[in-house]
Image (cartoon, rainbow, N blue to C red):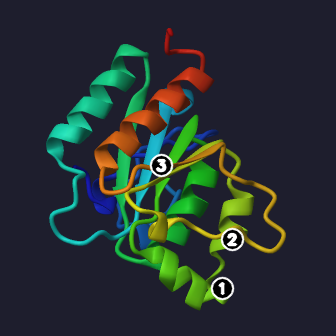
Amino acid sequence: MKECEEFTPYVSAGMVPLRPRVAAWSIRGARRHQRADMTIMILRGPHPAGNAFNGELLRSLQQLAREAGRIVEVCTCAGLRDFITGLRLARSQAPEFVLLDPGDIAQEAQAHPEAGLHDALDELTSPYIEVHDGSDSALEAGPCQRGAPLATIIINGDLSTSYRIALGIALRQLGTLKC
């Protein structure tokens, strides 16, 4: 699994792989890349140890996406601030679809509405699906939220199934998954 510092999203106009840590990402000096319209970004918040997102699950998701002609990129964020920065980066990078897994930041976001999570979600231009392993980790809608998720997938205690369902929905929405 890639950490934020290894995440290689693509800028919609410049199509650039970026390497710095999520809180310090910069678009300056970036080279062009051709695949922004084929990327599905997974943005993951912090999870307790032993979380079900592992290399096997990532390989499975990447294989499913590859068979549909897409690329899955993962960014793991350390906390609410990194997650919000990741959302803003997703807006500037314009991936084709975003899977949001806030993990343990839901409670932090409720305690700190001034942090800007709902603003960052409203600014996200790509369609997104929330992925959760429990109903207690679901994000609450903002007071004037405009950009609601396409779907919210919660399979209590089974994050890997939540991811597989969310990716299936994303690929179907993109017209690449045959039913």
Give the mark, 2 or 3, whose residue is nearer the N terminus: 3
Marks 2 and 3, Cα distance to the nearest angstrom?
29 Å
The amino acid type, in three-letter code, at marker 2 is: His
- Percent across and percent down for residue 119 are 72, 70
Q: Which mark is residue 30?
A: 3
Q: Do the residues labelled 2 and 1 touch (CB within 8 Å)?
A: yes
Side of 38 relative to 21 (left or right)? right
Q: Which residue is drawn at 43% across and 24% down?
A: 70
Q: Which residue is drawn at 55% across and 58% down?
A: 89
Give the mark, 3 or 1, whose residue is nearer the N terminus: 3
Q: Is residue 137 above or below residue 59?
A: below
Marks 2 and 1, Cα distance to the nearest angstrom?
8 Å
The amino acid type, in three-letter code, at marker 1 is: Pro
Side of 6 relative to 125 (left or right)? left
Q: Which mark is residue 118?
A: 2
Give the mark, 2 or 1, whose residue is nearer the N terminus: 1
Q: Is residue 166 above or below residue 54?
A: above
Q: Residue 53 carries which label?
A: none
Element marked by disc 2: helix
- Percent across and percent down for residue 53 are 24, 51
Q: Residue at x 60, y 62 (%)?
A: 88
One can see residue 31 in this view: no
Give the residue at mark 1: 113
Q: Quadrant of residue 96?
A: top right
